[in-house]
Image: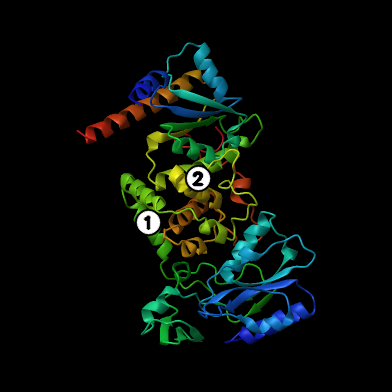
Amino acid sequence: MTVEAVQAQHEDKRPKIVAFLCNWCSYAGADLAGSGRMDYPANLRVIRVPCSGRVDPLFVLKALEQGADAVLVSGCHPGDCHYAKGNYYARRRLTALLELLEFTGVPPHKYRFEWVSASEGKEFAQVIREMVEALNAAEQKAAMAHV
Amino acid sequence: MSDPDPVPTLRAKARELLEQGTVRAVVGYQSHAESGLPVPAVITRPDQAEALVFNPLCAHNLSRYVQGGAEKPVAVVAKACDTRALVVMMQESHIRREDVFVIAMGCTGIVDAARIDERARAPWRRIEAIRTDGDAVAVETDAGVARLSLTEDLLPRCVACPVPQPVIDDVRLGDFPEAPPGRPDPLAAQVAEIEAMGRDERRRFFSETYNRCIRCYACRNVCPLCFCEKCFADETRPQWVPRSTLGGGNELYHMVRAMHLAGRCIGCGACERACPVGLPLMAVNTKMAQVVDGMFGHVAGVRMDDTPPFAVYRDADPDLPGHGGGKS
């Protein structure tokens, strides 16, 4: 058991972020961050979706329930959706979901919803850096609480 | 037109609808054979109409039983608040307006049946009669009369009754209050109380709440608006929610249910009353109703021509945190 746990630490980068990225903007933005050789932590597990409008709040909640340390949902900026309006529907669902997560006391470092365009590789890298920093800070704080 | 006791009129109407073949069934309330408490009744023969009752203990939202798609409509006995569920069902094309004949019943609030135990002098087995006189409800049991009040003993959702007039009706029986009673809403107070906690405390509160859930799905099954033929919680490919509560999934189930009811929940509180382990299930539902009203200006089921709030959008909708809102 211990051996697996230790090995898993090497294979399995913690904290783990599950990212739902829209095919047309945010996935391309992540790609640009990579091809532009921008540095950002390798904690992402990317799930490519056709549109942020595809992201059911269930996906976000299921990822958290399964033990993801954080979930990112990212799509085209409002007005830029490849399907014209998918991200507007997503925006209603995600803003409502934000309220539910806050109300039920889910710590804010566990979720982030962002608009990232295909040209925003730098911004994408920054989002991931911020998320990992927030997760590390929260972990440190929790560890201190047990000292 | 004042009609202090609408029950004879209700029975006559039900009889008439069934005799003339206008409807295929009447969904109403009858007295339970043993306890005498009102329970749902589905009647299909005119001679059964005499069994129908209506009194301030008729808490069930009978729109739960309405199914569309048949040649003839179903008549449903509905309090003003219950009609909101029918309206949402129509807005979502679950039923058509012509699928239902709405018998709207005047109502000044439903009393909490649990109060009978508190107010009866001795343990009771059977309710013999329920008499209403103004604000006083006398529940005559085999162990004496339990006196309840239509101001002190109301169900939480009735205290500030936001919709005293039916949104839709085909016939109105009894007296309908003109305006909401203007009392503070205990459900909103509960939300405010939870919001006043710190985030960690809220997390503890909801974890402890959902940990107690036995996942009997009574909340879903009793909900007039949980009408999906296949619920995500029953799905096996993929299996979102494990079959056994030992495998976790309680919190996921309740959080997703809260999202599925956001902008749709009419606040009838049936889930909370059905819950065998006493979970405060209305807290998230009330909160999400406030959110959808605040962000999108939508209140579930109060206007026939509304569109479901998550089936539309506006450029000016609130944007994600850190973004300006509207088009960028």
Q: Tell me residue A49's x, y (percent).
A: 59, 29
Depth check: give the residue in front, B284 or B21.
B21
Q: What's under tag 2, amino acid-wise?
A: Ala
Q: What's under tag 1, amino acid-wise?
A: Ala
Q: In the rendered image, is residue B152 in sight?
A: no
**Residue appearing at x 68%, y 82% in the figure:** B49
Quarter of the image where one finds residue A127: top left
> Between marks 1 and 2, how big is the CA–CA gap?
18 Å
Depth check: give the residue in front, B24 or A95.
B24
Subunit ID for the residue under disc 2: A
What is the tally of numbered marks visible in this picture? Answer: 2
Instruction: Point out which mark residue B218 bears.
Output: none
Q: Tell me residue A75's x, y (percent).
A: 55, 30
* CB within 8 Å, label 1 to label 2: no
Quarter of the figure with the N terminus of chain B = bottom right
Q: Residues within 10 Å of mark 1 (few under 14, many from 20)?
A: few
Report the residue that reaches farthest toward the front: A1
Q: Tell me residue B45's x, y (percent).
A: 73, 78
B306 versus A106 height, above or below? below
**Residue appearing at x 75%, y 65% in the figure:** B98
Instruction: Point out which mark residue B192 bears.
Output: 1
Quarter of the figure with the C terminus of chain B = top right
Q: Which residue is mark 2?
A: A96
**Residue appearing at x 47%, y 18% in the figure:** A122
**Residue appearing at x 56%, y 58% in the figure:** B221
Q: In the rendered image, is residue B7 in sight?
A: yes
Helix or strand or loop: what does disc 2 sit on?
Answer: helix
Subunit ID for the residue under disc 1: B
Helix or strand or loop: what does disc 1 sit on?
Answer: helix
Depth check: give the residue in front, B320 or B153.
B153
Q: Tell me residue B105's x, y (percent).
A: 60, 76
Q: Is residue B85 left or right of residue B252?
A: right
